[in-house]
Amino acid sequence: MAIISQSILFLLISALLGFLCAPVLRQVLIKYRVVREAKIEDKLGHETRINKAGTPVMGGLLVILVTAFITVLFNWDRSFSWVPIGVMLFSAALGGVDDLLNIFGRKRRIRSVTLVKTLSKVHKGLWGRLWYKIVLPFARIRGYLKLLGSNPGKGIQVHEKLFLQFLAGLATAWWLFFKLGPQWKLVWLPFSQNGGLDIGWLLIPIIILIVMATANAVNLADGLDGLAGGTLISGFGGLLIISWFQGNTVFAVLNATVIGALLAYTYFNIKPARFQMGDVGSLGLGTLLAVMTIAQNRIIILPLLGFIFFVELFSVIIQVIARHGFGKRLFLMAPLHHHFELKGWPEEKIVARFWILNGLAVALGVWLSLH
């Protein structure tokens, strides 16, 4: 009961601080013109997208800063909280730079695979030709990864994001293996009688992949007012309940703090949104959702805690395969929420149904976690 009482108190404090800071953050974003550009929304070719032009972005800073502030002051623990907060801030900084570059940056000149291949043959210098031969495989990989992105050309490119997210996943894996103790190396399985599955060092690439996938999945889902915020609330809510049963006060308070800040953010993000999350929030909170699930040894149920996020992610992957492999689209538009928009569903209907579906998946995940 003490853990429940303390975590609820921090949830309320976090929500109150979020509600106090939200109007100030919005005014700062408007003052410095950190707003959604009309020309980016025009590319989506949908009326509801165009109406969002001019809305402040980087509203996710509210959740990031409130969570970090309260944790550092009142819930700091070198064993359990410093890596989740550090990795969250790292990913949020990556997203924030991307947000700012997409608004204020210049269009970047990225050489195509064809051009790199040509330069490797015709460049006037021997060392130049050798250099382009070396980077040609990386240019091919960059070209394939670009298919998964929706970058307008000014921000951080897909391959650059993935590399930096790889570092965030690597930091998480190092923390789990060398700081949390041997019990965290066992992958928990529901209904398991022996405490979990020991997969050894194979857990490291799995952790890295999970952190990268979850961050990008949340980023893809941040396309409708209230969608990402409400879905994250249910995901962290599931982790909060699990942390109560595990008896870990630090994790419980951290999850509760995130939920409180998300409640304040989502209040201002419900249609019509007063601000949008931006990459600073979606990448930071997506990473934190993955790290906290890993830290609480519930990797198996992460697809349930973030059910809608992974549905959105796989809809993009399936669309890319269908379009470039078979020459046709499976969805009218990906991620999946855009498909339903183009079918005529109101934005509020999509968001509410996605919230419900994620809530049911989280309930299933919590139930499995108790067995």
Image (tube, rainbow, N blue to C red):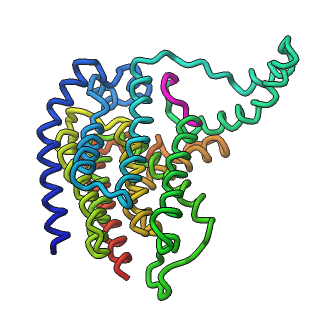
The part of the chain drawn in magenta is 153-159
Residue 244 location in percent, x, y? 26, 72
Q: State whether residue 360 is above or below residue 212.
A: below
Please state if 261 lies on the left or on the right of 192 as rendered.
left
Quadrant of the frame with the C terminus? bottom left
Identify the main secondary structure in magenta.
Answer: loop
Residue 265 location in percent, x, y? 21, 43
Q: Is residue 156 magenta?
A: yes
Q: Tell me which residue sits at (28%, 74%) in the image.
A: 247
Query: Looking at this rendering, what residue extends furthest in the bottom direction?
Result: 193
Please state if 271 lies on the left or on the right of 317 as rendered.
left
Q: Can residue 337 be seen in this view?
A: no
Q: State whether residue 278 is above or below residue 108.
A: below
Taking depth in this image into account, of 168 and 101 the one nearest to the observer is 168
Taking depth in this image into account, of 1 and 266 the one nearest to the observer is 1
Q: Tell me which residue sits at (30%, 30%) in the image.
A: 57
Quadrant of the frame with the N terminus? bottom left
Q: Tell me which residue sits at (66%, 33%) in the image.
A: 143
